[in-house]
Structure formats: C-alpha cells, structure tokens
Amino acid sequence: MKDSLRKMKPDAIHDLIALGALYRPGPMDNIPTYIACKHGKQQPNYLHPLLKDVLKDTYGVIIYQEQVMKIAQVLSGYSLGAADLLRKAMGKKIKAEMAAQSEIFIKGATNNGVEAKQAQDIYDAVAKFAS
C-alpha cells in the first residue's frame, strides 16, 4: 500500500478512497492502470462510449460496486433492482446466477446497439472486478 501511495501521489481525498477500494484481490491488478491514467501516461479505457460518464472519475477503472450496477443499467437496460441482483451474484460468486446474468447482460447490451463480443468483454471485465 505504501508503494502504491508513493506512485499515485494522491492530491485529493477521492484518490485515497479509490486506492483503498482497489487494494484487494481482483481490483488490485488495476492499481498501475489507475496511476498511469491519473498521471496522463496512459489514456483511460472506458470499455464503451456509453460508459464514459460512469467510469470517468476513476480513469476507466471499475472500482466501486455502484459502478457495476450503473454499467448494467446504462449498457444493458437493467433496473436498479436487477442491477443489485447482478452485483450480489458476482459478490457471492454464485455461478448459476452469474451465467444467467451474463445472458441477460449481453442481450440487453446488444439490444442497446453494442456488439455481442464487446458486451461479453465488458461483462467479463465487470466479473473480474467482482473476483
């Protein structure tokens, strides 16, 4: 954590909050990306133009559970209640529910004009966050 703080050079409270949320298995792999984007050494990857507003404050890195819910809502047309079910399934790693949610997520995204392959990639990124 000390090394990450030195590299990040936080200049606002939200940097500390983000690092605290990132510093756990799964999301920890994204600390270098967050730092590189914060310092302008790398361009953020928002996964899809529809997600820029959801991910802009975290430089394209999924950090918070609320972002998972908002991604499902914006990209795939989930209601907030349904998005919470997705979040819970991922958090508890319920394989059968995650498989069902994957189909719903991809179908909703393709209905929203997202290519199926890209929708699958985004779902996988969200699921990796939840790991």
Image (cartoon, rainbow, N blue to C red):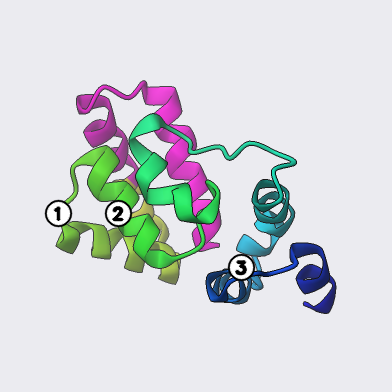
Q: Earlier in the sequence, mark 3 or mark 2?
A: 3
Residue under label 1: 79
> Horizontal and vertical percent for residue 72?
29, 48
Secondary element at image label 1 = loop
Type of the residue with mark 3: Leu
Q: Residue at x 61, y 77 (%)?
A: 20
Q: What is the quadrant of residue 5 in the picture?
A: bottom right
> Horizontal placement of 28 versus 102: left or right?
right
Residue under label 2: 70
> Horizontal placement of 92 versus 27: left or right?
left
Distance from the alpha carbon under mark 3 to that under mark 2: 18 Å
Q: Classify 73 as above or below 18.
A: above
Q: Residues within 10 Å of mark 3 (few under 14, many from 20)?
A: many
Q: Earlier in the sequence, mark 1 or mark 2?
A: 2
> Horizontal and vertical percent for residue 115?
36, 21
The magenta segment: 102-131
Q: Residue at x 48, y 35 (%)?
A: 47
- Is residue 26 in view from this perspective? no
